[in-house]
Image: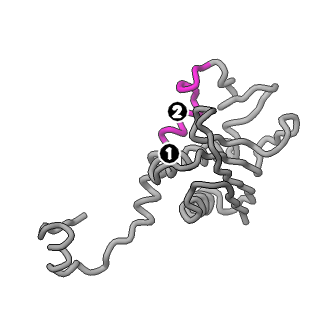
Amino acid sequence: MSNINHCGYGYSKILCEDIASWFVSNFFPRHKINLTVLHRGLKREHALGYCDVMTEVEEYPHRPRNFLIELDTYMDEETYSLTLFHELTHMAQWIRGSLRHRYGKLCYSLKPVENYDYFDQPHEIEARKEEIRLYERYLNEKQVVPVEEPSQGWCNRLCGGAIITK
């Protein structure tokens, strides 16, 4: 069973818990992961989020299980969700072992990421793709679709008489 904690200010506790729990239960249901999501101001650092392993660099295990995700406060809901999914993707990379420290360098698939510009680093490319895919999947799974069609009066008030279908 995993342990998910969150703290800080300027964020939706419900959204944070829901996304992190959904991610862990869908992708790592049998792992014992300790995740802390810290919300704080990151504007000075020109970042929206970070994912770090919570052990000393010298003690990095091959596949760590203790993580700290730091997120900037006061993001709109979509940016917040995408950023959290981005950082959770980095957590997954650490857990799978594709992202790790090797000979004192951060490596992705055994290649040092310092050889690339930040936006061209392979683990960042993967995280940018996955954040969108995960966000869309999360929204689709969480979406509440009415069982019955709305009455004509309800539809007239909300959509001017147009019938909306999926």
Tell me: 139 left or right of 93: left
Above or below, 160 relative to 88: below
Mark 2, residue position: 125
Quarter of the image with the N terminus is: bottom right
Mark 1, residue position: 131
Which residue is found at the position 87% from the left and 34% from the top?
58
Q: x and y percent of residue 43 in the render?
A: 59, 37
Above or below, 99 relative to 156: above
Q: x and y percent of residue 113 in the render?
A: 65, 25
Which residue is found at the position 72% from the left and 42% from the top?
52
Residue stretch rendered in magenta on the structure: 116-129
- In depth, the one of 72 and 165 nearer the eye is 72
Three-letter amino acid code at the position of disc 1: Glu
Task: Point out the residue furthest to the top here.
Answer: 115
Quarter of the image with the C terminus is: bottom left
Q: Quadrant of residue 146?
A: bottom left
Q: Is residue 5 rendered magenta in the image?
A: no
Q: x and y percent of residue 115 in the render?
A: 64, 18
Q: CA distance from mark 1 to mark 2?
A: 10 Å
Which residue is found at the position 62% from the left and 43% from the top?
41
